Every structure is written in structure tokens, then in C-alpha cells.
Image (cartoon, rainbow, N blue to C red):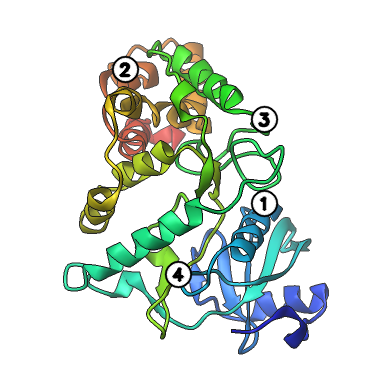
Amino acid sequence: MITCHEVPLPSDDEIVELCTITAPFAGSPNGNQLVKISDDIAVKFGLGVRRQEAANQSYARSHVDSTVLYIPQVFHFFRANLSGFDMGFIVMEYVLGVSLNTISVVDHPHLAKRTMEAIRHLAMVPIPSDQGPGPVGGGSAYGYLWSEDGTGQSLGSVEDMEEWMNRRLDVVKQPRISLASHQQLSMRHMDLVRRNIILLSNSSVCFVDWAFAGFFPDIFEFHTFQDLLYTDSTWFEQLLHLSPKPDDNDKQILPYLGIPAVVNNKYSYVYMEYTRCYGLQSTKGSTTLIRATRHVSAPTLNKMFLASLPARWG
């Protein structure tokens, strides 16, 4: 693989121009996109591309054994205006391989085992001094547990994280949780859908898309695997089977971990505000829906909630 000094980088303006004229090879048409601007360089850009993603990726790469887990090298991060919007740009190594999204994991169960080995290896990455829960260096945590708006603040300690979640559980009158037995933080990718895993020619795995990564209790990643079962049951059943089993305390916490994200989601607040302002009474009101489905996974709950919005609010 390449090293930074071997790669002559275009200027920021040139990179922005290349991103406008180059067809993306991955990403969402209405979200973040990835383009290949040379044989060795890829650029991820978009409104949701943040410096902390580059920091997560760089830090993890510097502390892992690349034969167990390969992580693309980050060359540069910058922000620039594109089409009238302030966007983030991560300039990184282009990695050639095969996405697990294109491979039958039923026919190749060793891929889940190899991924779990990489997960365990990543968890051994040393935690920086003064690092709290969340991304490397601090800042808002993003991902399935925090909603699209993130935490909106750095979480300085497990106690801060616990309080952030409990304030949102209070909103919907759900039991508060205690993370006292989960003080140990370890590095977690937190978005190991198959499209974010690449199988390399030497049979090692490569993790991409570090936007949700950071230092979290291990139970959070287990919850994410449970939460994503509905999207890819075969894959996440394999990962759950290989994961350490939750103890009795974990089992009490797990049903509630996804609720704060739903409460924090801006659509939930909009809906509750419309309900309050217009005096609407409905069994599909957001608070009622959340109370009635507290054991449903967060993405499923959010889909149910959005489906209940009147068309004029869509």
C-alpha cells in the first residue's frame, strides 16, 4: 500500500473541481459521495463529512496491525464551498478490493469470523489521554445511537453520556439506565454494514467509513448489530453469534439504548410541536408511538414514526 510522501496531492481547489466532474463510485446521490481522482487517491465529500471522521480513521490506522485490519490512509482534510454549500473533504488512499456487499456471507462464513477478529483487534487500540466517549479528540458523536443531529456536544465522561441519554428517556417517561458497569471504553467502528467492509487480495479485511466511530462501551456495538438485523439479517446474525453474550445487566439496558436517538431526531421534535400547536389527538402521536413500541429497534421505530406523519408534513 502507498504512503503519504509517495502521493503528490492536488491543491484543494483542484480537488473540489475534480469532485464536480468525476462520477462517484460510492455514496448516496443525495448525500456524501466518493470519487476516485487518481489511481491512488479517493475523496469523500459532502455536508456530513466531518474532521472527526478523518481523525477517527487516522488514529485507528496508526495503531492497528494492517494484516488483521487494513484502514485507508488519510492524506488531508479540508472544508470548501461546493454548489453554494460548505462541505467537508477527506482525501485518502484508494483501496482496491471486493465489497462484502457483493459476496454471499452464507457461502463464506469465514468472512464474519475474520471481521470479528478485526473488531477485537480494533478494541485493543489504546485510548488517548483525556478521551471521553465519542470520536477521537472529542466533539459530537454521530450514528445510530445519537440520531442524524448527533449529541451536539462532547461527552467528557461515561457519566455525561449516561445523563445525555437519560434526559431523552425522561421525555418519553422511560426508565433511566445506568452505565456504571460500562466505564471501560474501547474503539468501535459502529457502522459495520457489509458495504463498509472490503476484502483485500491478501484476504485481510478493510474497514471504511469512520463517521460513526469512536470510543464506546462494547455493549453499544452489540446493540448496533441488533438494531441493524432488519437490514441484513444473515450478516448481523453471524456477528451477534460471534460476539460476547450480554450479561443480565446488559439485557436490562439494551432495550432502551435506541430510544434517545429517536427522541433526539429533529423529525420527532417537529411532530411533537405540530401535535402540540394544532391540538391533534392521535394514537400515532410520537410520544404514544414510542411508549407503545419501546422494544422495537430504533430504525424500525423511526420508520413507523415517519410513516405516521400526515402527507402535508412530509
Measure how far apart labels 2 and 1 are at the Cα level: 34 Å
Q: What residue did someone put label 4 on?
A: 68
Do the numbered discs 4 and 2 sit on residues whose CB atoms are within 8 Å?
no
> Closer to us: mark 4 or mark 3?
4
The N terminus appears in which quarter of the rendering?
bottom right
**What amino acid is at disc 4?**
Val
Do the numbered discs 1 and 3 sit on residues whose CB atoms are within 8 Å?
no
Q: What residue did someone put label 1 on?
A: 52
The mark found on residue 110 in the picture is none
Q: Point out the tag, 1 or 3, that comes first from the N-terminus.
A: 1
Residue 287 image-quadrant placement:
top left
Determine the residue positioned at 29% across, 34% down. Answer: 246
Measure how far apart labels 1 and 4 are at the Cα level: 24 Å
Q: What residue did someone put label 3 on?
A: 156
Q: What residue did someone put label 2 on?
A: 291
Measure how far apart labels 3 and 2 are at the Cα level: 30 Å
Q: Is residue 188 above or below residue 74?
A: above
